[in-house]
Image: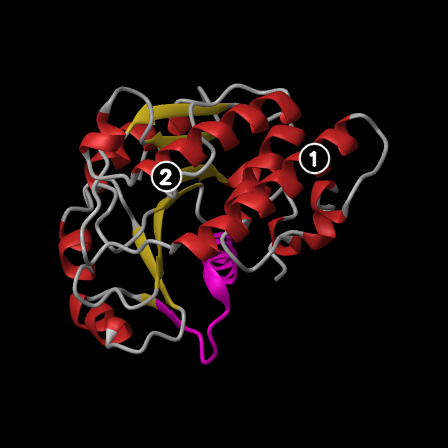
């Protein structure tokens, strides 16, 4: 708990058996109340490792639903069990759990409703092993997005995020894509709904066991990001308003 607010960590997992325990053991359980693991039809024993670690809430997809589909299951479950603050942490140990207290504090003190762990703040991205082509693409896409969505973030592509319950109960994240562009759609929704976003510097770690998409999928992702950004621009101008930007009504909340 953080000042009577329930803190839940959600772990979107795919073939994370080798790194799950290391990630889990660094979670600050003096602050975190619950952990939810979603195994997106892994080919290894990710779910079994999670069970052995004592994770109470384990979701197992019988078919691979994708990175976005994985997160939808996690956020819906987090709301179902009464989470007030939700931290999305990759179980591949690419992001350090040691930043959780800082992220929780920012939301728990009602300073911001969303916190991102930024790999770009500071100069650690390339030193931490981020491939040069990904760094350049990150910089280009982030610049384009800041212009199109009329915001200012150091990056939109980090997978380390924390949300208040209010955010998850307001934005229509279940309408988003099931693939990697889900993350950008979600940030676009957050900005469109005028929630505050904070960023904290996050160390970058690239290694063999850390999940990473290949060049072909990176290209698909980049095009998807531009699609989302232009869609946000047109919605902001009042030209169109896709379903992802429609706020949830009370009767729709917590429904998958």
Q: Which mark is residue 15?
A: none
Magenta part of the chain: 58-80
Question: Residue 168, how many percent across, how many down?
Answer: 55, 44
Q: Is residue 74 above or below residue 109?
A: below
**In the shown orientation, is residue 144 left or right of residue 53?**
right
Report helix, strand or loop for mark 1: helix
Looking at the image, what colour scheme do you see? secondary structure
Question: Residue 88, how many percent across, how many down?
Answer: 38, 47
Magenta stretch: residue 59 in it? yes
Q: Is residue 43 above or below residue 169?
A: below
Magenta stretch: residue 243 in it? no
Residue drawn 28% across the image and 73% down it? 47
**In the shown orientation, is residue 246 left or right of residue 132?**
right
What is the CA distance from the residue labelled 2 to the residue labelled 1? 23 Å
**In the shown orientation, is residue 56 left or right of residue 136?**
left
Report helix, strand or loop for mark 2: helix
Residue drawn 27% across the image and 36% down it? 100
Question: Residue 248, how many percent across, how many down?
Answer: 71, 45
Residue drawn 75% across the image and 27% down it? 236
Label the magenta part by its dominant secondary structure.
helix
Q: Which residue is mark 1?
A: 230
**In the shown orientation, is residue 196 left or right of residue 232?**
left
Q: Foreground residue, 46 or 212? A: 212
The answer, for residue 81, to whether it is visible in the render is no
The numbered mark, 2 or 1, whose residue comes first in the sequence reads 2
Q: Which residue is mark 2?
A: 133
Q: Foreground residue, 2 or 193? A: 193
């Amino acid at each position: 708990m953080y000042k009577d607010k329930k803190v839940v960590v959600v772990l979107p997992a795919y073939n994370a058996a080798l790194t799950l325990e290391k990630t889990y053991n660094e979670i600050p359980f003096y602050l975190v109340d619950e952990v939810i693991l979603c195994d997106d039809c892994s080919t290894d024993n990710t779910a079994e490792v999670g069970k052995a670690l004592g994770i109470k809430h384990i979701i197992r997809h019988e078919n691979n639903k994708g990175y976005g589909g994985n997160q939808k299951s996690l956020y819906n479950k987090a709301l179902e069990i009464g989470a007030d603050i939700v931290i999305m942490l990759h179980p591949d140990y690419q992001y350090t759990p040691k930043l959780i207290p800082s992220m929780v504090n920012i939301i728990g003190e009602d300073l911001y409703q969303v916190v991102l762990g930024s790999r770009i703040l500071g100069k650690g991205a390339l030193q931490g092993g981020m491939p040069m082509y990904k760094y350049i693409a990150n910089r280009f896409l982030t610049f384009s997005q800041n212009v199109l969505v009329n915001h200012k973030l150091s990056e939109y592509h980090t997978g380390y995020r924390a949300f208040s319950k209010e955010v998850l109960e307001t934005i229509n994240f279940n309408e988003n894509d099931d693939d990697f562009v889900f993350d950008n759609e979600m940030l676009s929704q957050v900005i469109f709904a005028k929630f505050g976003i904070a960023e904290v510097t996050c160390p970058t770690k690239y290694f063999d066991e850390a999940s990473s998409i290949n060049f072909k999928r990176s290209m698909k992702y980049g095009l998807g990001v531009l699609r989302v950004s232009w869609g946000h621009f047109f919605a902001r101008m009042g030209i169109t308003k896709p379903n992802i930007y429609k706020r949830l009504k009370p009767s729709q909340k917590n429904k998958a």
